[in-house]
Image (cartoon, grey):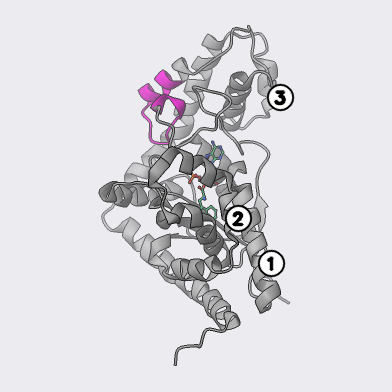
Amino acid sequence: MTNAKLRTFSGIQPTGQLHLGNYLGAIRNWVQTQAKYDNYFCVVDLHAITAPHDPAELRAATRAVAALYLACGVDLDYATVFVQSHVPAHSQLAWLLMTQTPLNWLESMTQYKEKSLRQGENVGAGLLNYPALMAADILLYQPHGVPVGADQKEHIEVTRDLARRFNDRYGPTFRLPEPWIQPEGARVMSLTDGTKKMSKSDPSDLSRISLLDTPKEIEKKIKRAKTDPQLGLSLDLDRPESTNLLTIYALLTHQEPSQVAAEFATSGYGPFKARLSEAAINFLAPMQTRYRELTQEVGYLETVLKTGAERARVVAHQTLTIASHNLGLLPPT
Ligand code: AMP
Ligand code: TRP
């Protein structure tokens, strides 16, 4: 009999500043259930280099994302926090999987289609192969669940397809992971357009609330957030901005969206936005204090990431060894 916990794996790219969408769609769910699971939370820097980037900014963002995981409540008693490139098995398994991936699976991915349109002539092969690297990230840890926002569902389906195909051809190697997507917060929308998701890559800073925004910035962004001319707020498919702002408010104040909708059913946007600003500022303040504390402590983050990578390497190496063996690669002597 074993009482081992189920395992989870998830990751965020260190590109730009993390925002409320990343928190509500992903990190919040990691933290809420972390005590029940054996968690691996990774800063996926190898994914971040699939788009044009600045090396110094990437290094800074990698540290910042790791620190934000901890500041948001990821607990090292329950989670292994590490940087993807510190565990070489991610790149190694990615290559093995790429050789097994049909090109048309990669070409049909929404994220690839959208980003390659944006990058035009500069589309690197890494952007196309991104899902094979993501599959490697996940499969190395043999997790049961992958807690993510709704936009990642497609990538987790490909991960499952690849794992199934590999197991069928070469024998049992990988566990098929489930996407764990919470109904609320899975798709936080932009503040400037309620039909687009809040994103790190949106050129307008007004479109998102970053986790490290100052109270002044938060107030300004919420004041300018897009609204509609109707009096009173409601949860309504035809009113994406109203629905999005109400949902954010509900999640930040730990209430049901329907309860919040009832409270603001006859309120104008002005008073509602004042309440939303206050809620966002109060919600983010303690997290920002923790972030400052732990980034100021010399050597702390380095130690966390060193220990994390050591632990991750052990697990990742086991899976890589099995996958290599099953594929027929001669083991080193
Ligand atoms: P990324 O920013 O693309 O690295 O995404 C990191 C995590 O945050 C993934 O689990 C995403 O699904 C989640 N995420 C990103 N943007 C949003 C959003 N607007 N709403 C909800 N979840 C999101
Ligand atoms: N592709 C994910 C995103 O853009 C980031 C990611 C990379 C990831 N590897 C992962 C998420 C493994 C979960 C599990 O959000």
Point 62% across, 54% down: residue: 156
Q: Is residue 268 magenta?
A: no
Q: Quadrant of the C terminus?
A: bottom left
In this rendering, which labeled residue sits more in front, label 3 or label 1?
1
Q: Earlier in the sequence, mark 3 or mark 1?
A: 1
Q: Relative to 91, is 253 above or below?
A: above
Residue 221: x %, y % from top left: 43, 21
Q: Is residue 217 magenta?
A: yes
Amino acid type at image mark 3: Ser
Amino acid type at image mark 1: Arg
Q: Which residue is mark 3?
A: 258
Circle 2 Cα neighbour tier, 10 Å, few/some/many (<14 / 14–19 / ≥20): few
Q: Which residue is mark 1?
A: 164
Of the pair 66 and 332, the residue shown nearer to us: 332
- Label 2 sits on a secondary structure element that is helix
Per the model, the C-alpha gap separating discs 3 and 1 is 40 Å
Residue placed farthest to the front in the image? 121
Q: Relative to 52, is 197 above or below?
A: above
Q: Which residues are magenta?
A: 205-221
Q: Relative to 256, is 130 above or below?
A: below
Residue 179: x %, y % from top left: 65, 52
Residue placed farthest to the right in the image? 1
In this rendering, which labeled residue sits more in front, label 3 or label 2?
2
Please indicate, yes or no, whether residue 273 appears anywhere in the rendered image: yes
Circle 3 Cα neighbour tier, 10 Å, few/some/many (<14 / 14–19 / ≥20): few
Per the model, the C-alpha gap separating discs 1 and 2 is 17 Å
